[in-house]
Amino acid sequence: MQSPLPLRVACLAVSAGLVLTGPALTGTALGDTPVATPQAAVGGALLATRATVVSLGSPPLPVTEASGWLVADLDTGAVLGAKDPHGRYAPASTLKTLTAQTLLPRLDPRRSVRPTFNDVNVDGTRAGLVEKLAYPVPELFRAMLVASANDAADTLASANGGVGRTARQMNAEALRLQARDTHAVNVNGLDAVGQTSSPYDLALIARAAMKNPAFRAYVATRRTWIAAPGGKRIALSSHDKLLYNYPGAIGIKNGYTVHARASFVGAATQGGHTLVVVLMHTAPRYWPQARDLLDWGFAATRLGVAPVGQLVEPIDPHAVVRAALANLPVTARAVPQQTGTIDGPPLLAGSVVGAGVLAVVGGVLRQRRRGRRRLTLPRL
């Protein structure tokens, strides 16, 4: 028996000329999450559902086993269709897209890194790194994104100060991107209590990451090599089956654990349009489902169907501060002061800047309540 959709969402669907089908499977990997209210759903009110949402006039949807999925235009951010877009699932190795998005600006590509004992002995897929070798940072990124190497992911995190520190920076970056369903506990995507993402968030992260030429080149690589003892090299092949089987595929990232099941983020370009597809909590043979959803998305694009939502833009912390300052009472006086050391490149350290923004906004609210109290602002 189908559960009734929230009345407000159903009304919005009718008024917008949209179709909402039965509710998506709620097999979230680490506990069910309530559907967002239409007002609170990032990307638009119609994405506040566990159901499937597409525009009227869209081509017939293909059959998919995924508990959650999303198809969007990577350039414009228009969401063409989705199922349980904000459902929170274990991301498996698709989390490595956020790892790369966070670490690429922080790690010097000219640097070489020697892995630790823990790095080379991490569970799951490994590239065969050894402690006695130092690996160029680009080789480690390729191993992580092409072959899903957990030892490469953890080695990159070690070069950044450790897994814990990197996970905190990943969470700050997720907040900056407005990926509010995402929480990282580790950097490799292995199952961990509290580690989640959603189809919408993975599309947001992929869209941001694909603007980085280095990331774009890494995920489009089908075959690469990494150093081995004795001057040898180990060949690594892409785990992205769509990259080998779909016209115009430009890669991104797959993932799998027994708990998360298969997850996938992929992109392809056809007819001047680049679409991204996300699948979560689906069968191991994911790529035919991704292929069919991309075919559907390109057909919907040719028909010019209306989007059902939008991949939002990242938060500009400086704009938030400026808006907060504009609303200060005229009696308020700002006294700039240095609040601490920014961790990493100043404009990319979302954790520190984001904390400053929250402090400013909180200060503005307190200023309004208390009337004459002076507000101290951090320097960004």
Image (cartoon, rainbow, N blue to C red):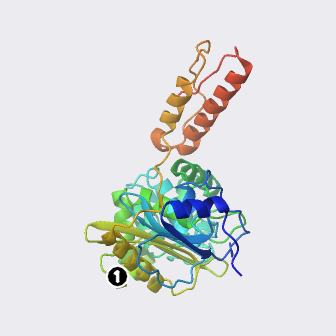
Residue 184 or residue 375, whichever sits in front: 375
**Which residue corresponds to the image point at 50% horizontal and 67% vertical from the top-left?**
18
Is residue 132 among the parts visible in the rendering?
Answer: no
Helix, strand or loop for disc 1: loop
Locate residue 352 relative to residue 59 in the image: left or right: right
Q: Is residue 321 above or below residue 74?
A: above
Residue 231 or residue 33, whichever sits in front: 33
Residue 234 or residue 360, whichever sits in front: 360
Residue 241 at x, y = what percent? 42, 83
Is residue 271 among the parts visible in the rendering?
Answer: yes
**Which residue corresponds to the image point at 60% horizontal and 32% vertical from the top-left?**
340
Residue 99 at x, y = what percent? 52, 60
Residue 68 at x, y = what percent? 58, 73
**Which residue corresponds to the image point at 47% horizontal and 80% vertical from the top-left?**
61
Name the quadrant containing residue 59: bottom left
Residue 20 at x, y = what percent? 56, 71
Instruction: From the image, tell me which residue sits under label 1.
Output: 246
The image quadrant where one finds the N terminus is bottom right
Locate residue 374 relative to residue 318 in the image: left or right: right
Name which residue type carries label 1.
Tyr
**Which residue corresponds to the image point at 41% horizontal and 63% vertical from the top-left?**
306
> Crowding at label 1, few (<14), some or many (≥20) Cα neighbours within 10 Å?
some
